[in-house]
Image (cartoon, grey):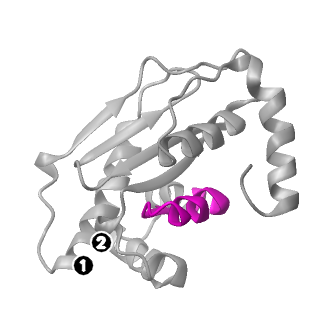
Amino acid sequence: MDMIIKEAANRGIKAHCFNSLIIEKLRTTEKSSLACIDEIFKNKRNRDHRLFQCQFVLCPINKDAHWTLLVVKPQTNAIEHYDSLGGDPQSDVISSVLELLCYAHVAEFNVPLDVNNWVSVKFKNIPLQGNSHDCGVFLCMFAKYVTLGKTIDFNQGDMAFFRSQMIREIASGSLI
């Protein structure tokens, strides 16, 4: 994900990716949401990003051993959900992301975020996985294609190629 964000920056695209544990932590914390979010933004990686200046904020989600991707688009007030099994975004996950955005909005602009102007979109015409183990590869490809403005035109048959491409990218330290 870091390489996707770096390549986006090289192309003049402002993007940020949260650690996959952040949304889970928000969903399951025994602390107040505000205390949990405050802790999240104490992390330098998150603190130094002005989320509402980003075109894309990527939120990888792992729930019940399945990876999905939420893409927040602050400039259009949209939260897009990409699930290679075709599932619906869960309301507690969307609520957690909105809480995070509310905190970030106050930090950036010193005014509350009007969440009533936001929409959550589930993409229906996206490729679906045909097995029980490719969801992570699909998540990475959704993130790469959406962030870099590519048409999502891959399918299950491309996963073996993408896996080997990802290995080469990790070894070289940059996207191919």
Residue in the picture at 55% in, 65% down: 10
Decide: is 125 above or below 108: above
The type of residue carrying mark 2 is Ala
* Other residues around mark 1 within 10 Å, as few (<14) / some (14–19) / many (≥20): some
The type of residue carrying mark 1 is Glu
Residue in the picture at 60% in, 18% down: 128
> Within the magenta stretch, is there residue 134?
no
Residue 1 is drawn in which quadrant?
bottom right
Element at badge 2?
A: helix
Decide: is 84 above or below 106: above
In the image shown, does 171 or 62 lie closer to the viewer?
Answer: 171
Query: In this figure, which residue is indicated by the disc labeled 1?
Result: 108
> Within the magenta stretch, is there residue 10?
yes
- Image label count: 2
Residue 93 is drawn in which quadrant?
top left
Q: Position of residue 43 (x, y in %)?
A: 52, 82
- Give the left or right position of residue 105, taking residue 152 as reference: left
Cβ–Cβ under 8 Å for marks 1 and 2 = yes
Query: In this figure, which residue is indicated by the disc labeled 2?
Result: 104
Cα–Cα span, label 1 and label 2: 6 Å
Q: Which residues are magenta?
A: 1-20
Mark linked to residue 79: none
